[in-house]
């Protein structure tokens, strides 16, 4: 059996390599376009995020009234620091950054609009 290629086989392999290279470039372009599309989508969502207008800290939950008329309630246990805080510490909060976040300075907790909307609880320390 011969290891050499005929002229036709060699031409066919060269053509296949060229087509594969073209496909790779198209995939890279699509990936770049998709990354840009995702980034624009995220920016759009961030721009559309409502602001926190009212906060109500209850014993077992925290209620956030948003500027788009939604009320989001999260369990207090989502923030172990707030869950362990006393009533005075829990009630000492401020709405900051034009309503983008709520800060509890006595216990070092910040909860953002994004965290509320995506359901992002604070990780507990490992014991």
Image: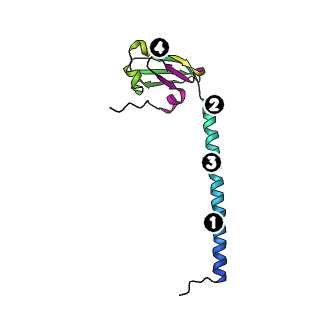
Identify residue for label 1.
20
Alpha carbon separation for disc pair 1 and 4: 63 Å
Q: Secondary structure at mark 4?
A: loop
Q: Label 4: which residue?
A: 92
Callouts 3 and 1 close, C-beta under 8 Å: no
Which residue range is magenta in the image? 98-127
Q: Nearer the viewer, residue 106 or 74?
A: 106
Which residue shows up at 66% across the image and 67% down it?
Answer: 19
> Please, what secondary structure does the residue beneath circle 1 have?
helix
Q: Residue at x 67, y 72 (%)?
A: 15
Dot in front, 4 or 2: 4
Q: Residue at x 65, y 59 (%)?
A: 25
Give yes or no for residue 126 being in the magenta stretch. yes
Q: What is the C-alpha distance between the residues marked 2 and 3? A: 20 Å
Q: Position of residue 100 (x, y in %)?
A: 57, 24
1 or 4: tag closer to the N-terminus: 1
Give the numbered dot on residue 34.
3
Q: CA distance from mark 3 to mark 1?
A: 21 Å
Local SS, label 3: helix
User: Gap in Å between the C-alphas at discs 4 and 2?
Assistant: 28 Å
């Amino acid at each position: 059996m011969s290891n050499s290629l005929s002229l036709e086989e060699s031409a066919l392999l060269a053509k296949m390599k060229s087509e594969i290279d073209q496909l790779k470039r198209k995939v890279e372009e699509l990936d770049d376009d998709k990354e840009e599309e995702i980034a624009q989508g995220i920016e759009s969502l961030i721009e559309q995020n409502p602001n926190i207008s009212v906060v109500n800290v209850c014993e077992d939950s925290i209620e956030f009234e948003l500027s788009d008329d939604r009320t989001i309630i999260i369990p207090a246990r989502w923030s172990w620091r707030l869950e362990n805080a006393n009533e005075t510490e829990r009630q000492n909060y401020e709405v900051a950054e034009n309503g983008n976040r709520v800060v509890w300075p006595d216990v070092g907790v910040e909860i953002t609009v994004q965290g509320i909307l995506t359901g992002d609880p604070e990780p507990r320390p490992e014991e």
